[in-house]
């Protein structure tokens, strides 16, 4: 079993839809949770960063962490074609920067 | 915000040659940088942790003599792929964290290496 599981998709939605992306993990020591967006042939771009459990909102993006269930989510409201990318969850046990990544979910938002 | 610059963005080399990739932190000093590798349609896998002024720490299965890491200053780490082979063709991405505050990792734009 991988430490971090993420459905690779692809996920296709119409413009304006609410998108839900998820990851599960097995290591209960993970404390830091991130979501990155990666466009083709580019490095990952940080979207959301959460420490421990709870929700965090930034514009159209909401990140949720449920440590009891070892489950994290990223919601995208009013999705746009420009949101089409691969979304990677990542997590770590400390803030030293060593992260374990999910496989990434490819999202396509159709106009 | 924190910016990490990586150079070159792509490189093609012949088997047996060596390739150097640079990673710079542009607006902060990074005592630690990280090198990841990403194969097509796969996730990022940590290769090594680059420590300024000391030896890099390699992940299990990564050959330290093949992937030479040098972190000679607080803003620059280099990864040299020595005696490259086609199976080394991949997307190499560096990252760094601003040690001031509680900021997360920021990534460079990656280097696509193709070994022919």
Image: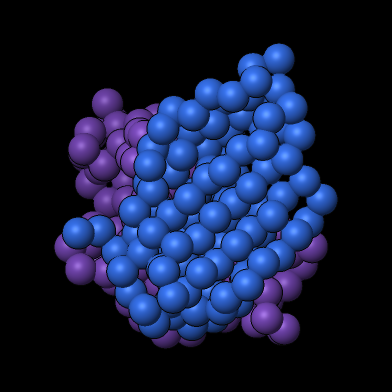
Residue B14 sits above or below residue A4 on the image: above
Question: Along the line of sight, which residue is nearer the eye, B6 or B16?
Answer: B6
Question: Along the line of sight, which residue is nearer the eye, B115 or A24?
Answer: A24
Q: Residue sitting at 43 percent across and 54 percent down?
A: A23
Residue at the top extreme, as displayed: A111
Q: Quadrant of the C terminus of chain A?
A: top right
- Classify residue A92 by image quadrant: bottom left
Q: Chain in blue?
A: A
- Classify residue A79 by image quadrant: top right
Question: Which percent across, then down, holds residue B11?
Answer: 45, 34
> Is residue B101 among the parts visible in the rendering?
yes
Q: Residue sitting at 57 percent across and 43 percent down?
A: A20
Rendered image coloring scheme: by chain
Residue at the front extreme, as displayed: A69
Q: How many marks?
A: 0
> Is residue B50 among the parts visible in the rendering?
no
Q: Quadrant of the N terminus of chain A?
A: bottom left
Q: Chain in purple?
A: B
Question: Which percent across, then down, holds residue A21?
Answer: 53, 45
Question: Along the line of sight, which residue is nearer the eye, B8 or A78?
Answer: A78
- For residue B27, side relative to residue B83 (left or right): right
- For residue A38, side relative to residue A70 (left or right): right
- Classify residue B45 by image quadrant: bottom left
Q: Residue sitting at 57 percent across and 75 percent down?
A: A53
Question: Along the line of sight, which residue is nearer the eye, B59 or A54?
Answer: A54
Q: Residue sitting at 44 percent across and 28 percent down?
A: A10
Residue B103 sits above or below residue A59 on the image: below
Question: Which percent across, then down, holds residue A45?
Answer: 63, 49
């Amino acid at each position: 079993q991988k430490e971090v599981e993420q459905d690779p998709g692809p996920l296709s939605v119409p413009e304006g839809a609410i998108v839900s992306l998820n990851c599960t993990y097995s290591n209960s020591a993970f404390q830091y949770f991130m979501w990155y967006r990666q466009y083709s042939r580019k490095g990952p771009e940080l979207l959301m960063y959460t420490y421990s459990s709870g929700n965090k909102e930034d514009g159209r993006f909401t990140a949720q962490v449920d440590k009891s269930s070892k489950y994290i989510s990223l919601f995208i409201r009013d999705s746009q074609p420009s949101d089409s990318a691969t979304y990677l969850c990542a997590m770590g046990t400390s803030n030293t920067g060593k992260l374990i990544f999910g496989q990434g979910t490819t999202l396509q938002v159709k106009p | 915000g924190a910016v990490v610059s990586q150079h070159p963005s792509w490189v093609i080399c012949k088997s047996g040659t060596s390739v150097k990739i640079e990673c710079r932190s542009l607006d902060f000093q990074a005592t630690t940088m990280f090198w990841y590798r990403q194969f097509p349609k796969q996730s990022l896998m940590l290769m090594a942790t680059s420590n300024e002024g000391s030896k890099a720490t390699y992940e299990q299965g990564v050959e330290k003599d093949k992937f030479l890491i040098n972190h000679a200053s607080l803003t620059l780490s280099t990864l040299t792929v020595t005696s490259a082979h086609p199976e080394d063709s991949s997307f190499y991405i560096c990252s760094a964290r601003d040690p001031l505050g509680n900021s997360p990792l920021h990534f460079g734009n990656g280097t696509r290496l193709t070994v022919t």
